[in-house]
Image (cartoon, rainbow, N blue to C red):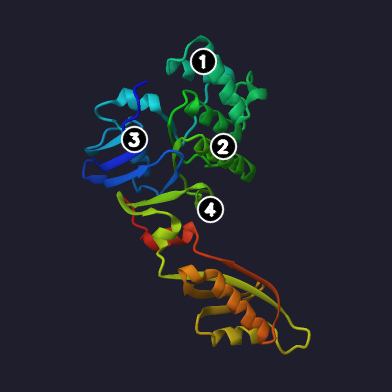
Amino acid sequence: MKASTGPPIELRGVHRWFGPTHAVNNVSFRVEPGEVFGYIGPNGAGKTTSMRILSTLDEPSAGDALVDGFSVIDDPDRVRARLGFMPDYFGTYQNVNVWEYLDFFARAYGLHAEERRRAIQYTMDFTGLDDLARKPIDGLSKGMKQRLCLGRTMIHDPSVMVLDEPAAGLDPRARIELREMISRLADLGKAVLISSHILTELAEICDRVAIIEHGELIAVGTVDEISGHAEEAIRVRVRVADPGGERGAESARAWLVAHQHVEQPAVTKEGITFTLLCEHDQREASLAGLLAELVGAGFAVTEFTSRGKSLEDVFLHVTKGRIQ
């Protein structure tokens, strides 16, 4: 295999038209080795189209996409040898078991004899499918089918993996296990591009994200970089005991209303919730200071929890809900 001549994934001004619809509009980004890169956007935003272009299943109308420096237009065969694509839909096949399925894809990628056997065994070990080698794949659970689909994606040891909605329809345990496998792939140095509607999952495993809407890339970076560093809105929940009947939840809410850095305090069944505004690099100091002020004001604080901007918060902030 010819040596890499560039980053694992690079999109350069990619456009894709379908008649009058501009499905992908000047999208550019790159993914480094060992990086898990989240690709998020509303339905119809252009995620799957640009991932199909990267995987040589479609061609750009303009621009280029490169894998290890090789163009999907000029060197599609070299791209396919270096890339594994996991689609959002897993097809089942009658009278084919797990081993035979992986064997078929290993042969399709040109693996021979002992090399093919080792690749299949390694893939089944990695995905935890060892005990299911002879099980017909149309009898597998959704979680096991996703493991098998991931296995066929990695059977030829690609340097780049493109995963389109891999956690769709999985139960919580299966999602956790899939997330762990993706993290292990990144630890092996593979560049992983992953799209998902489950933003909490992406936030836990992605090093960076790109947000696309209406075919246009509107933000790229870490959650902190996208949300900005000037001021952070932290969601806080507080519970207070009221042994004397004078310093309870309503009293604490009234005290918080007067605090210059607190917004929208409200009493709920879970406690008092509010937003604390602070400088990005002063998060811990601001939280500690507010807690000390509450205790100093005589409130018996029994619980004090906080949450900064999540990936969902950032997504809702930068997108406008437009559809193609």
Looking at the picture, which amino acid does disc 2 mark?
Met
Residue 97 in the figure: left or right of residue 211: right
Name which of mark 3 and mark 2 comes first in the sequence.
3
Q: In the rendered structure, are the residues bearing label 2 and label 4 in contact, judged by CB atoms less than 8 Å apart? A: no
Please state which of the two labelled residues, at mark 1 or mark 4, is closer to the viewer: 1
In this rendered view, identify the residue nearer to me: 254 or 96.
254
Residue holding disc 4: 200
Name which of mark 1 and mark 4 comes first in the sequence.
1
Name which of mark 1 and mark 3 comes first in the sequence.
3
Please tell me how crowded label 4 is: few (under 14), some (14-19), or many (20+) other residues with Cα within 10 Å. few
Name which of mark 1 and mark 2 comes first in the sequence.
1
Mark 4 and mark 3: Cα distance apart in space = 25 Å
Say the numbered circle drawn on residue 54: 3
Mark 3 and mark 2: Cα distance apart in space = 22 Å
Secondary structure, mark 2, is: helix
Secondary structure, mark 4, is: helix
Name which of mark 4 and mark 3 comes first in the sequence.
3
Say the numbered circle drawn on residue 116: 1
Residue holding disc 2: 181
Looking at the picture, which amino acid does disc 1 mark?
Arg
Residue at 61% x, 72% y is 237
Please tell me how crowded label 3 is: few (under 14), some (14-19), or many (20+) other residues with Cα within 10 Å. many
Q: In the rendered structure, are the residues bearing label 1 and label 2 in contact, judged by CB atoms less than 8 Å apart? A: no
Residue at 63% x, 77% y is 291
